[in-house]
Image: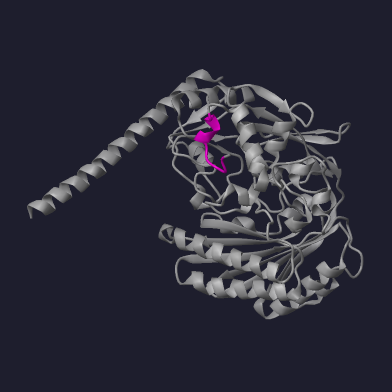
């Protein structure tokens, strides 16, 4: 009995000590919050728990991506971002930078320390002479596309609604326009960077080639980007939208997609198909896209002819087409992504993805798995040929990187299931990659897209041989490792 009492006392004492330690850390973080509030201009704001703005600043699309911060900070200008970075480095207070808050990985854009929310960087400035747009990092792409619609132009951003500018332009960026213009990182002209020492600089390929290389795919390892200037392209109305099928039409849809990718080489045409499994029910949603008000006869006829349960297809603004895939319907779930590069969606490959969807859909339903999706993202072999300027991602653009992709999404509700979901997602992704390799596709060393890589992914699996040079660039710009206080992929 004495032993039990002693053990109980030790456990309770340990818990009390842990609680006191946590409270002390939070008090230290709050002191940093107060220091920032006192040092920055009156236009910038610091918010605390209980404020609606604090709640908004900490909100994330996936609950796995959220934490409770000591405060949130909304800088109004780059100079105040620099002041905050210097104080964070001095106090060694953890922080996070939120653009759209779409990363599902814990701690990537959330923190127990200071949550920096970039909402004030919300302008879109179009320069018709330079054919560029300067875009604030606090925006989501929906806002950007709508604003640029006024000028009859667009930029290469995200393909789904609700996604922030920051993660896309600093991470890669695949979209319906990528067959024509490449990735988002291929279309960056310059970035306004607040360096860890507080210096504000415009980074271009000529002013600082190393940082221009690192920032395009290397996220916030080198400081905080507040605005990005991108190439614009003339944008007419487009044809397309969503067409939805029941499970009974799955094989017919797969056949039509296999025929599409094997015959259509028009870079203006694109197909993006997602298969959702929820509570034993399968729903197939396919986005058809053509970058003109009408499409050439025959390109999409097979997919349109299949019996379907819903259709939202028309000639419309590009900004309106982005809204047709209801990506925000899964907000609030715990979530993970995985990414499998392949070359081409053959019929056997599509049948394999169908089998994976059914198998893991049933497997995850035995726990708190609520929704799983296997998305098919085919591109042309010329995908990576649109830029000659090296980028952190993709660091390699050789023929071994694939040019089409399977994006895996698992959504669940119980935090106790986190490990099993990550394990099963990794298992499925490894199987699909090996299937492609065994089928003769040259993707055994293909890099994983960092925006869709699950927690714990090795840097070499995303950045390959570039890891060493990226580490050197990071060390040069941030010798005190201030950005190491933030989450995300760290060099």
Q: Is the C terminus in the top left, top right, bottom left or bottom right quadrant?
A: top right
Residue in view at x 56 percent, y 19 percent: 41
Residue in view at x 75 percent, y 57 percent: 400
Horizontal relation, residue 30 to residue 20: left or right? right
Which residue is outermost to the right?
297
Image coords of residue 340 (percent x, y): 66, 61
Observer-nearest residue: 216 or 141? 216
Q: Is the N terminus in the top left, top right, bottom left or bottom right quadrant?
A: bottom left
Observer-nearest residue: 139 or 193? 193
Horizontal relation, residue 292 to residue 230: left or right? right
Image coords of residue 279 (percent x, y): 52, 72
Q: Magenta part of the protein: which range?
A: 481-490
Which residue is outermost to the bottom?
248
Image coords of residue 290 (percent x, y): 84, 59
Residue 317 seen? no
Residue 239 seen? yes
**How many dots with numbers?**
0
Horizontal relation, residue 137 to residue 385: left or right? left
Residue in view at x 79 percent, y 28 percent: 206
Q: Quadrant of residue 140?
A: top right
177 to 443, vertically: above or below: above
Observer-nearest residue: 182 or 205? 205
Q: Main secondary structure of the magenta part?
A: loop
């Amino acid at each position: 009995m004495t032993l039990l009492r002693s053990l109980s006392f030790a456990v309770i004492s340990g818990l009390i000590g842990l609680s006191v330690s946590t409270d002390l850390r939070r008090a230290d973080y709050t002191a940093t919050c107060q220091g920032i509030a006192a040092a920055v201009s009156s236009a910038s704001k610091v918010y605390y728990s209980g404020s609606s703005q604090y709640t908004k600043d900490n909100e994330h699309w996936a609950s796995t991506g959220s934490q409770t911060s000591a405060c949130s900070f909304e800088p109004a200008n780059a100079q105040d971002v620099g002041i905050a970075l210097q104080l964070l480095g001095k106090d060694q207070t953890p922080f996070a930078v939120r653009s759209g808050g779409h990363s599902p990985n814990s701690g990537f854009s959330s923190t127990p320390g200071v949550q920096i929310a970039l909402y004030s960087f919300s302008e879109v400035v179009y320069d018709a002479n330079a054919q560029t747009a300067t875009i604030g990092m606090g925006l989501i792409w929906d806002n950007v596309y709508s604003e640029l619609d006024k000028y009859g132009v667009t930029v290469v951003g995200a393909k789904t609604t609700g996604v922030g500018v920051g993660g896309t332009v600093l991470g890669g960026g695949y979209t319906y326009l990528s067959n024509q213009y490449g990735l988002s990182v291929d279309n960056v002209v310059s970035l306004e960077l607040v360096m860890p020492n507080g210096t504000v600089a415009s980074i271009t390929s000529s002013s600082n080639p190393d940082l221009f290389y690192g920032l395009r795919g290397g996220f916030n390892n080198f400081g905080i980007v507040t605005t990005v200037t991108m190439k614009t392209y003339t944008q007419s109305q487009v044809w397309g939208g969503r067409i939805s099928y029941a499970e009974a039409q799955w094989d017919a849809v797969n056949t039509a997609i296999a025929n599409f990718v094997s015959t259509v080489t028009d870079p203006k045409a694109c197909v993006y198909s997602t298969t959702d499994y929820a509570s034993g029910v399968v729903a197939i949603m396919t986005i058809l896209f053509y970058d003109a008000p009408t499409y050439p006869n025959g390109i999409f006829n097979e997919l349109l002819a299949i019996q379907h349960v819903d259709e939202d297809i028309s000639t419309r603004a590009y900004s309106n087409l982005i809204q047709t895939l209801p990506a925000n319907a899964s907000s609030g779930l715990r979530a993970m992504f995985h990414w499998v590069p392949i070359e081409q969606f053959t019929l056997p490959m599509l049948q394999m993805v169908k089998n994976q969807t059914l198998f893991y859909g049933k497997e995850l339903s035995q726990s708190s798995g609520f929704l799983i999706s296997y998305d098919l993202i085919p591109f042309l072999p010329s995908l990576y040929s649109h830029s000659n300027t090296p980028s952190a991602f993709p660091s390699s653009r050789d023929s071994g990187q694939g040019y089409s992709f399977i994006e895996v999404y698992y959504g669940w509700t119980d935090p106790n299931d986190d490990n099993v979901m990550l394990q099963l997602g990794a298992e499925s992704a490894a199987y699909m990659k090996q299937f492609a390799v065994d089928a003769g596709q040259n993707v055994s060393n293909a890099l994983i897209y960092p925006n869709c890589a699950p927690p714990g992914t090795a840097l070499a699996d995303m950045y390959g041989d570039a890891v060493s040079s990226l580490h050197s660039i990071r060390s040069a710009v941030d010798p005190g490792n201030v950005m190491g206080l933030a989450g995300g992929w760290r060099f």
